[in-house]
Amino acid sequence: MPRKKPFSNKQKKKQLQDRRERKRGPLDAGRSESNSRSHSRERGEENTDTSDSESVRPQVRRVNQQPQIFRPGDKGYDPNRYRLQFDRESKEEIERRKKLAVEKVLEPVTETELEVDIEKIYRPGSVLDFPKRPAWSYEMSKEAVLSQEERAFREYLQKIYEKHTPQELSYFDHNLETWRQLWRVLEMSDVVLLITDIRHPVLHFSPALYDYVTQELGRSLILVLNKIDLAPPALVVAWKHYFQEKFPQVHVVCFTSYPRHPDEEQDPSVVFKKRRKKRRAWNAALGPNLLLRACEIITAGNVDLTSWREKIERDSAALLSAAGREEEEDEKEADETDVVVAQQVTDAELGAPSRERYKDGVLSIGCVGFPNVGKSSLINGLVGKKIVSVSRTPGHTKYFQTYFLTPTVRLCDCPGLIFPSLIDKQQQLLAGIYPIAQIQEPYTSVGYLSCRIPVPRLLKLKHPDGDDQGWTAWGICEAWADKRGYKTAKASRSDTYRGANSLLRLAVDGRLCLCMRPPGYCHQKETFEKHPETLEMISQVQSRGQSDSRSLSAGEEEEEEISSSGEEEEERDRDADEEEDEDEDPAETKKGAKSKVADVNPYALLGEDEC
């Protein structure tokens, strides 16, 4: 018997990759070759699709890898088509920041350093723009249109990297497919909702998008300051006036899907508590009336919005009558006139270069913004119930969808997009634009946070060396890991990486809340605290928060306290970003064992971006 030929692991890997390529088959006619993964031999290879811009910046890091699922009759499906893609940082830069986090003693910054000016971040009129769709017509073939868009995107990246180094730039999306989703939403929308997080509104507001929507497209833009429950009312009013003065054509609306009592903001113990509602009252959202009023001003009677106003009145009445809340919801589901319907949009409607507004008497509202600013939650708040899946993980919404709020109002949910800017990357991570489980170096972001809010005092941390004179970013992560009982598997040392990720999650959730200020806020703080709009907002939040609490029975709300001693038996591991939807639907929790298995993160085995 002849001796077997040696077969290395490398050869075996190549054999599996070749077999996978054969299963994929030839390229589909409706798919661009440059966007295909058929030429990629390794998952980590850099030059695999158009959005990487090979000639400009080949080092691109892809996050949120999804497994390839072969479905019968769905040959062209690519689950990674809309992956988040950022500039890949060098190992030397990551190691340099780690060393800095270990050695540098943190010093608190003054409150004036929390003031951020949009001129310094985006530099209006510079190359820090966003890619715009090239002109096209129906006489062009699909391949010609795709090729033209890919060429324009490469030129767009080329201009940015010629003017700025990767160290100067923030994270921004390098995936052309996701930008195409934005183009489609902008083309089919009559009104554009630019949704921002009130903690970092300047970060989420691109002046280039404002100019494009208001001037080139001739559309109206509504700026939504979302999650206002996480900021003091005076700061919310200050940001509102800042944007109204800076951008006169914008309509500013304050919104929150979860009103809470203002006294909770003053209680430091809320850092250790995570409120979970078994059933969220989506119709308790604060802001739908303001949004309706802004749309009525914009449409000027060209669209009948009576059905929308009637829906808001019904939701308010259902919220006030807490006793019959369950029965009313059942009746609404049985014979509801404003049923929300997900609509499949045809290709002709997606890309039609038409200036027609309010087609067929329907107002189309496009919801755009950065990841994790609450676009899907805002849609749920407008509808009054959960119709869109929401998650803390950036990039959870993969492609845009349309929903009819009423027969005359259509909502378009767009995937989150990150625009290029000059803001600190650490602040971007605190804003939740990057999946926390895949951050390679989270320590400097924790240091950035600790210099602006007293993290050790809020979390009652003990210094690892027994000396509270000087805290480093690494020391804070180590102390939190000791307090929570995070240990490495082999050596049983303090797991500082897991501790850092846990702190970042507290920041993204708003329990360690860092809010940036508009320019001059420190000198005008007392004026805004006594402003009539501030007093009105406080009264609205108090009344809505009390109504929300009355509408929930004792069995529908619970508070989970983070143990201050760190002694927790069988604590659920929250290190995976795909842990859960932010608000679980009761019907989904009643599923059998299959749903429990589906909740387990199947992508944790990939380990592509582990440190």
Image (spheres, helix red, strand yellow):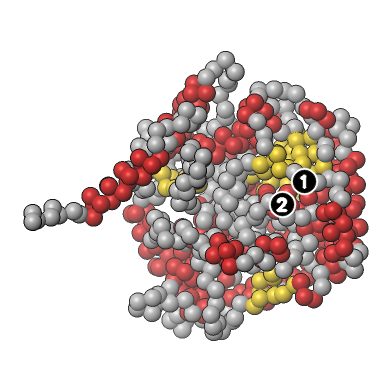
Q: In the rendering, at what x and y percent does residue 383 appear?
A: 78, 50
- Toward the front, the furthest residue is 1
Task: Examine the image and state in which quarter residue 119 appears.
Answer: top right
Tell me: residue 300, above or below residue 107: above
Mark 2 packing: few (<14 Cα in 10 Å), some, or many (20+)?
some
Residue shown at 51% from the left, 39% from the top: 73
Mark 1 packing: few (<14 Cα in 10 Å), some, or many (20+)?
some
Q: Secondary structure at mark 1?
A: loop
Residue shown at 49% from the left, 79% from the top: 485
Task: Report whether residue 448 is seen.
Answer: no
The residue pinned by badge 2 equals 387
- Side (left or right) of 37 relative to 532: left
Going by the numbered disc 2, the residue's amino acid type is Ile
- Side (left or right) of 535 relative to 555: right
Q: Earlier in the sequence, mark 1 or mark 2?
A: 1
**Along the line of sight, the residue nearer the viewer: 386 or 375:** 386
Task: Examine the image and state in which quarter residue 99 appears.
Answer: bottom left
Q: How many marks?
A: 2
- Toward the left, the furthest residue is 2
* Whether label 1 touches label 2, CB < 8 Å: yes
Task: Examine the image and state in which quarter residue 210 appears.
Answer: top right
Distance from disc 1 to disc 2, alpha carbons, whole Å, reads: 8 Å
Q: In the rendering, at what x and y percent does residue 211 appear?
A: 66, 32
Tell me: residue 444, above or below residue 86: below
**Along the line of sight, the residue nearer the viewer: 135 or 402:** 402
Q: Quadrant of the C terminus?
A: bottom left
Going by the numbered disc 1, the residue's amino acid type is Val
Q: Quadrant of the N terminus?
A: bottom left
Residue shown at 37% from the left, 54% from the top: 93
Q: In the rendering, at what x and y percent does residue 213 appear?
A: 68, 32
The residue pinned by badge 1 equals 340
Q: In the rendering, at what x and y percent does residue 519 appear?
A: 67, 49
